[in-house]
Image (tube, rainbow, N blue to C red):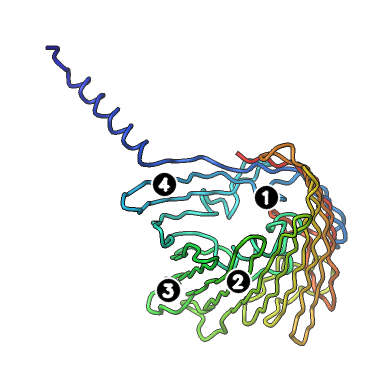
Amino acid sequence: MKKLTLTTTLAACFCLMQASAQAQSTVTIYGVMDIGMSYDQGGINGNALRVTSGMATQSRWGFRGTEDLGNGLSAYFVLEGGIHADTGGSTQNSTLFGRTSIVGLSNSLGTVSAGLQDTPYFTTLNTIVDPLRNGIARSNNLMAATGFRAGNSILVRSNKVNGFNADLMYVAGEVVGDVNAGRAIGGSFGYSEGPLNLRIAYHNKNNDSASIQNTSKARNVLFAANYDFGIAKTYFGYAIDKGLNSASLNNAAASFGGIAPTASTDSRDLHLGVSVPFGMQTVVATYIRKDDKTSLAQDAQQYALAYMFAFSKRTDVYTSYAIIRNKNGAAYTEGNSEEAGTGNKQFTVGLRHRF
C-alpha cells in the first residue's frame, strides 16, 4: 500500500471540497460597457460635445451567486458597481459597489434581501413604465422621486401567484435616539400575465435628521401599465408626488439663466411610450409631462425618439434625440443614465455590449 504524504492528503481534500462547492453554488461575473457621444444644446453656457459612458445603460460590472441550501431554500448575493467607461473611474460617488450590495434568501414563496438595492418604486418605473429604462431620454429627467436606490434596506418580494405578486421595503434611518428620522417605507403590488403588466408602487420617506426635525414627508405613488400588442408595446405611468424632496430636480442649476429652479412639493407626472420592433431594429418614442401644482407652476414636457440596432442579443448600437420644454422658470435639463445634461436638447449615438 502506498503512503500518502500530508501534502497529497490536503490536496485531495481541497479538490473534494471544491467539487462539492461547485455542485451546490454558482458565481457569475456580468456587466455592461456602454460608450458613445452626446451633444447638448440650449444651455446658457453654450453647446457641449462629450464622449460619454453609459448613456443608454450605465456601464457596470458585478458578481452574483447562489448556493443551494437544501429543502428548496437558497442563499444569494449581488455586488454591482458603476463604471465611467470613458475614464475608468467608479460612479456613485466613487464607490466600489454603489449600485447594488445585497445578500438574501429565497424559496418557493419569494425572496428576502438586505443591503443597498433598488426600491420597489424605482423597479416599477424602470421595468413597467419606461421603455428606455432610465437611459437615453430618461424618465428621471422629469420624474425624479425621493426613493430610487436605498442602503440599509430590507426587501421582501413574493413570487407570482395567479399572476399577482407584491414587495415591501423598509429602510432604516439609523439616527441615534430617533428611529423615525431618515426612515423610508415602500412597496408595490401588481399583476403580470401574458402581454399585460399592471402595477402600483409607493414610497414614503421621513426627511427628519439628527439636527432637523418636524419636516414634511416625501410621498410618491406611481400607477404603471404596459401592454404588448406584438407589432408594438405601449407604456403608461402616472405619478403623484407630495412633500419635501418628493420631486427632486435632475439639475438644480440655473441652466437657462435667471434664478435657480425650485423643486416642487406637489406635482403630477404623466409618462406615455411606445416601442416598435422591426427584426433587429427597434424604434422607441416617449412623452413625459411634469405638472407642478404649487404656485410657481414650473411645468415641463419631454419629447424623445430613439433607435436601436442589435448585432446580437449582447451588442447593439443606438441613437436618440430628446427635447424638454420648460415653463415659468423650470430648468429641467436633457440627461441620460450617466449625466444630467447641460441644455434642453440632447442628441446621442453609442455602442452597448453586455457580458
Q: Is mark 4 on a helix, strand or loop?
A: strand
> Which mark is nearer the camera, 2 or 3?
2
Residue at numbered disc 2:
146
> Mark 1 and mark 3: span between their CA atoms?
34 Å
Gap between marks 2 and 1 measured at Cα: 21 Å
Identify which residue is drawn at 67% across, 61% down.
195
How much space separates mark 2 and mark 3, taking CA atoms?
18 Å
Residue located at (88% from left, 61% from top): 42
Q: Percent position (x, y) of residue 212? A: 51, 81
The residue singled out by tag 1 in the image is: 57
Residue where numbered disc 3 is placed = 175
- Between disc 2 and disc 3, whose residue precedes? 2
* 21 horizontally vs 51: left or right: left
Q: Residue 66 carries which label?
A: 4
Crowding around mark 3 (Cα neighbors within 10 Å: few <14, some 14 to 19, many 20+) is some
Question: Residue at 49% of width from left, 40% of height from top?
Answer: 28
Q: Which of marks 3 and 4 is in front?
A: 4
Can you give x and y, in whole percent of width and height, for residue 182 in the image? 49, 74
| Rendered residue at 55%/71% (across/down) | 188
Expressed as whole percent of the image width and height from the top left, the position of residue 223 reads 65, 74
Mark 2 or mark 1: whose residue is earlier in sequence: 1
Sequence-earlier tag: 3 or 4: 4
